[in-house]
Image (cartoon, rainbow, N blue to C red):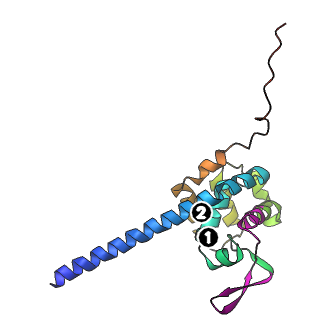
Amino acid sequence: MKKLLTIALLSVSALIASTSVASAQSTSQSYIEKFKDNAIRIMHETGVPASIILGVAMHESGSGKSAIAKNLNNQFGVKGGGGAVYYKGNKKVRSSYKKYDSVMDSFKDFARIMTERKQFSHLADKFTQYDYKGWAKGIQRSGYCSSKKWASQVMGIIKRYSLNEFDDDAAPDTTASKKPELANNN
């Protein structure tokens, strides 16, 4: 009887674990679908790879599931902004994290930090939009995080979801609406 109970408990545990993994995958895929166009647009404006924008956001916010992502639209754990306040149930929470009006504003601010803040601005000169590995390692070396595994974790997310494919997306063609001129062979 003990053996049967143990097997049943192990089976239930395995089912719960696989359901949790599938749920996390679904959450991540939904996050990517929802925000990939924003990341690509920002990449074309700033040179920061879309894969880095999405990969770092997914890592730092748990694909949008963290409290600061949900309550402050802060996808990157950026601090500052004068002590944002949000409510968790009936409890008022004061936060040292910056509050954004939208997720897109959070993405734009991250790209601004990467391209304008002296600590990180050299990365845009050193790496292209196609070198997400260089960007991830450079961001870590420049002091964005304290974890020695951070770049590997971000690169793992990028690889797992093939986010680097977004780095190859061409800029929107503004000339496509123009009709091609025919050559005059006279």
Name the residue: 68% across, 78% down: 71
Q: Position of residue 127 (x, y in %)?
A: 72, 51
Image quadrant of residue 18? bottom left
Numbered tag placed on residue 64 in the rendering: 1
Q: Position of residue 151 (x, y in %)?
A: 61, 64
Residue linked to disc 2: 31
Q: Quadrant of the C terminus?
A: top right
Q: Which amino acid does the dot numbered 1 rest on?
A: Gly
Q: Quadrant of the N terminus?
A: bottom left
Alpha-carbon neighbours of circle 2 within 10 Å: few (<14), some, or many (≥20)? Answer: some
Numbered tag placed on residue 154 in the rendering: none
Q: Position of residue 83 (x, y in %)?
A: 78, 84
Callout 1: SS: loop
**Pointer 2 with pointer 1, Cβ within 8 A:** yes
Q: Which amino acid does the dot numbered 2 rest on?
A: Tyr
Of the pair 131 and 56, the residue shown nearer to us: 56
Range shown magenta: 82-111
105 with respect to 24 (left or right): right
C-alpha span from label 2 to label 1: 7 Å
Name the residue: 64% across, 66% down: 57
